[in-house]
Every structure is written in structure tokens, then in C-alpha cells.
Image (spheres, helix red, strand yellow):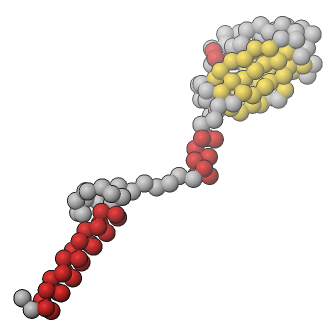
Amino acid sequence: MTRNKKIAAVVLVLLVVGVGVGIFVANDGQTNDVATPKPTTKATTKSQATPASQSNRKETVTVRYGDNGFSPATVTVKAGSSITFINESNQSINPSSDPHPTHTTNPQLTVGTIDAGESKTITVTKVGQWGVHNHLNPSEKLTVIVQ
């Protein structure tokens, strides 16, 4: 073998070894086949994850009962959230699902008697728009929207 052929053979061997090392390093030290694609992962930033977590967030909404009835007159909550009824009057109340007196539209909203100065919390899961009234004074109304 001539000197030039020997140099060419050494260069070829070094080139093959260099490519092999490069492939090994590119695969993070794994000895996978070069033809096997490496799985890719996409990073999720906090700002991308926030809207989904907020859309599923459960909450507690407060409805107060005083001299002017329920306040606010309409509440909107996500399914699975809670509603706390606080009786700030000097009389008992009985928030109940419409219609009066059967309370059958959405029984989840039939809270029961709440004495003066007391409160009760319920959880709502049935999606829709629901009427609630004070069973002890049916003209006092509240609308509950569950999304």
C-alpha cells in the first residue's frame, strides 16, 4: 500500500468513528438505531396551562339574605362549586328550589331552614338556570346559573 492510500484509509476510519461518536452524542448517549426517531416533547409554559386550570376551577359564591331579600339576586357558578347562604336577617329563611311549594326543579337548591345569623353551604352540579325562593316568603327570589 502506498503512503497516500494509507493516509486515505486512516482518514476514512477516523471519519467513520467521528460520525459514530456524533450520532451517539446526538442521541444523548443512547445506542438506539440511527433510523429510530427520537421522541420529542413540547414544553408547556405556565401561561399556556393557566386557562385550562381556570376553566375547571371550582369556587364558593356567597348569597346574603337581609331585609331586602337575597343579594345578589343572580349568581353564576361552575358545576361542582359551592354556594354559601348567609342569613343576616332577624328571622329564619328557607331557600328552596322552584316551583313553590314542591321544590322539584332542582332539589340541590333546596337548602332547608337557616336561622337568623346562621349560614349553610351547598354544592351544585346540575347545569342550567334555576329559580330559588324563600319557602317562608315565596315572593323573595334568587336565580342560580350553573355552568
Answer above or below: position of 61 versus 21: above
Q: Residue at x 25, y 56 (%)?
A: 32
Q: Residue at x 24, y 78 (%)?
A: 15
Q: Is residue 32 visible?
A: yes
Left or right, 110 with respect to 1, comes to right
Q: Horizontal and vertical percent for residue 20?
A: 25, 68
Q: Horizontal and vertical percent for residue 44?
A: 53, 52
- Where residue 9 sits, quadrant-wise, is bottom left
Q: Residue at x 57, y 53 (%)?
A: 45
Q: Horizontal and vertical percent for residue 102?
A: 67, 10
Answer above or below: position of 141 versus 118: below
Answer above or below: position of 8 versus 78: below
Of 91 and 25, the residue lying toward us: 25
Of 66 and 29, the residue lying toward us: 29
- Where residue 14 sits, quadrant-wise, is bottom left
Answer above or below: position of 35 versus 18: above
Left or right, 86 with respect to 101, comes to right
Q: Residue at x 91, y 14 (%)?
A: 89
Of 85 and 41, the residue lying toward us: 41
Of 4 and 130, the residue lying toward us: 4
